[in-house]
Image (tube, helix red, strand yellow):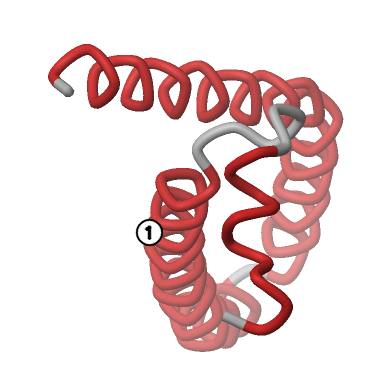
Amino acid sequence: YQDRAYYRVELDRDIDNPDQRLTEDVAAFTKVSLDFFITVLTAVIDLASFSGILYSIYPNLFYAIFAYATFGSLTTVALGKTLVGQNAQQLLKEADLRYSLVRLCE
């Protein structure tokens, strides 16, 4: 409530439905962060346990699989960069839809 910032945000039409956008952003951030952490932790555990076994059995196969995984990861990152902007656009359109639906019900 400091300096009536809430009222200024409501009057400024450059920022539409900030409360819904914040709620959606926090929910999306926490879900993605938790999923990412669990995925990375599982991958590290799997890598540590299976790498030692595979290397002790057949070192050349270990190097080939490591190179293949590196190539696949770099390709995925390169192709996935466009998805970041598309995800932001989707969240923007969903927030606008929710805002319009709330205004329609009022």
Looking at the image, is 42 positioned above or below residue 65? below
Q: How many marks?
A: 1
Of residue 55 and residue 72, the one placed in the foreground of this image is 72
Spot occupied by residue 75 in the image (x, y as percentages of width and height) = 81, 30
Which image quadrant is residue 16 in? top right
Q: Tell me: 65 left or right of 46.
A: right
Looking at the image, is 25 positioned above or below residue 36? above
Name which residue lies at 68% across and 24% down.
Answer: 83
Residue at the disc numbered 1: 27
Looking at the image, is 98 positioned above or below residue 100? below
Q: Tell me: 56 left or right of 63.
A: left
Name which residue lies at 45% across and 52% down.
Answer: 19
Quadrant where the N terminus is found in the figure = bottom right
Secondary structure under badge 1?
helix
Q: Tell me: 28 left or right of 85.
A: left
Of residue 20 and residue 5, the one placed in the foreground of this image is 5
Spot occupied by residue 78 in the image (x, y as percentages of width and height) = 86, 30
Of residue 70 and residue 19, the one placed in the foreground of this image is 19
Spot occupied by residue 22 in the image (x, y as percentages of width and height) = 50, 56
Of residue 22 and residue 72, the one placed in the foreground of this image is 22
Spot occupied by residue 96 in the image (x, y as percentages of width and height) = 47, 20
Which image quadrant is residue 71 in? top right
Name which residue lies at 68% across and 56% down.
Answer: 61
Q: Residues within 10 Å of mark 1 (few under 14, many from 20)?
A: few
Name which residue lies at 29% across and 21% down.
Answer: 103
Q: Which residue is situated farthest in the left direction here?
A: 105
Quadrant where the C terminus is found in the figure = top left
Kind of residue indicated by mark 1: Ala
